[in-house]
């Protein structure tokens, strides 16, 4: 089996078979990841196609220093958040026309976190905009992690790899991957708690 790096090198030479191999390797994982963010299967499918179009047209932007899976995840995540922001902008005018219903707060809003920080909750329609904002906050916290810790977190909790496979992908011992993952989760949980405490005081 060709490595991700080998396939990307062949894509740079416009090898369609290499592109198809990468697509088959990651497409379903990326689609599920996108569906969790945008909560819309049709949109997730479109965004998945756009993600891989970026791979075909901009493969040279991956410098090979981090994992390809992590780079692919970042493309998909950025596209998903851009999509959500676009949806939010389109909805702002109707929401302003509607009485005060759009201002209803989610009763469980403080639990709108990814599964690796807290138990998933499903907000009602009135909490949709709050969810977008909180996802933005989580994304910023993840982006603030040191790169080596961030990559393990992405591979395990977003790309749904096992610790063993993530370690292989990054070329590090499995114990090191476990240690980095523990650090990342502990730091994120602490930062989120600090952020929530600060919001409650303001």
Image: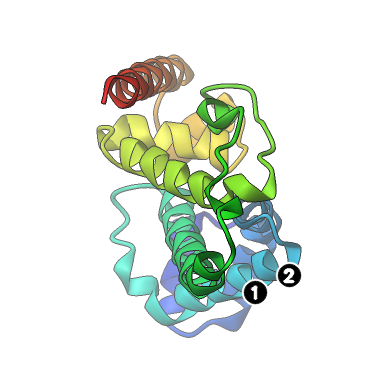
Q: Position of residue 142 (x, y in %)?
A: 36, 37
Dot 2 and dot 1 residues touching (CB under 8 Å) = yes
Q: Is residue 96 left or right of residue 19?
A: left
In the image, farthest residue toward the right: 41
74 is higher (above) or lower (below) than 105: below
Q: Residues within 10 Å of mark 2 (few under 14, many from 20)?
A: few
- Residue 53 lies, with reference to residue 39, above or below; the image says below
Q: Residue at x 74, y 63 (%)?
A: 41
Q: Which numbered circle lies on residue 46?
A: 1
For the point 63% across and 23% down, which residue is it? 119
- Residue 18 visible to the viewer: no
**Cα–Cα gap, marks 2 and 1:** 6 Å
Query: Which residue carries the number 2 mark?
Result: 42
Residue at the (60%, 27%) spot, across then down: 108
99 above or below 191? Answer: below
- The quadrant where residue 2 appears: bottom right
Residue 112 position, x and y percent, is 55, 33
Residue under the point 26% across and 37% down: 144
Residue 129 in the image, given as x and y percentages of width and height: 51, 52
What's the image's color scheme? rainbow
Classify the position of the C terminus by image quarter: top left
């Amino acid at each position: 089996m060709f490595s991700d790096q080998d396939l990307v090198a062949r894509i740079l030479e416009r090898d369609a078979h290499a592109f198809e191999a990468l697509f088959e390797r990651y497409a379903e994982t990326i689609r599920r990841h996108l569906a969790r963010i945008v909560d819309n299967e049709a949109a997730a499918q479109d965004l998945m196609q756009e993600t891989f179009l970026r791979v075909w047209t901009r493969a040279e932007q991956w410098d090979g220093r981090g994992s390809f899976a992590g780079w692919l995840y970042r493309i998909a995540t950025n596209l998903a958040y851009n999509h959500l922001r676009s949806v939010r902008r389109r909805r702002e005018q109707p929401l302003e026309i509607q009485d005060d219903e759009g201002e209803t707060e989610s009763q469980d809003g403080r639990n709108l976190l990814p599964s690796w920080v807290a138990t998933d909750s499903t907000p009602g329609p009135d909490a949709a905009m709050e969810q977008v904002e909180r996802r933005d906050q989580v994304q910023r916290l993840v982006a603030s992690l040191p790169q080596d810790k961030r990559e393990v977190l992405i591979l395990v909790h977003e790309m749904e790899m096992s610790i063993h496979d993530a370690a292989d992908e990054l070329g590090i011992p499995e114990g090191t991957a476990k240690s980095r993952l523990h650090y990342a989760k502990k730091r994120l949980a602490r930062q989120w708690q600090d952020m929530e405490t600060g919001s409650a005081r303001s």
